Amino acid sequence: QVQLVESGGGSVEAGGSLKLTCVASRTIENFATMGWYRQAPGKQREFVASIISGGRGLVDEDVRGRFAISIENGNTLYLQMDSLKPEDTAVYYCHADSPLGTKNYWGQGTQVTVSA
């Protein structure tokens, strides 16, 4: 059973920073990708960033230049969020998928609230 545990959410003013952490029960070599999604009230869950074993990261264009994804010790995933905007307010979820893409794993989510 794969477990993903997020932490680091909170409330900040616009322009502020937060760093989210996700600790996985397995290392990234056991997954196709690990990453972050977010879901704002009344909206669908959307992709934010992902990373593969070896460290190459992909960041959605809406947050590129402000958010950065990284991984440490093979199982601790980070999302550094700078220059936060009110529209970044959402529940952020850690995600991992199996090597064949047949299984998706999700964390419990962590709330990020950005005030104007």
Image: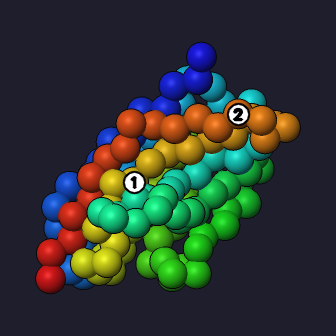
Residue named by callout 1: 92
Rendered view: 41 above or below 29: below
Which is nearer the N-term, disc 1 or disc 2?
A: 1
**Render colour scheme:** rainbow
Q: SS of the residue at dot 2?
A: loop
Q: Amino acid at mark 2?
A: Lys
Residue 39 drawn at (x, y percent): 40, 59
* Between marks 1 and 2 in the image, the one whose residue lies nearer the viewer: 2
Q: Amino acid at mark 1?
A: Tyr
The disc placed on residue 103 is 2
In this rendering, would 64 be left or right of 53? left
Query: Considering the image in quadrants, where does the C terminus appear?
Result: bottom left
Q: CA distance from mark 1 to mark 2?
A: 19 Å
Residue 115 drawn at (x, y percent): 15, 75
In this rendering, would 63 be left or right of 116? right
Which residue sits at x=17%, y=67%? Answer: 12
Rendered view: 85 above or below 29: below
Query: Considering the image in quadrants, where does the N terminus appear?
Result: top right
Mark 1 nearby-residue class (10 Å; few <14, some 14–19, many ≥20):
many
Q: Which sits in the foreground, 35 or 19?
A: 35
- Residue farthest to the top, as pictured: 1
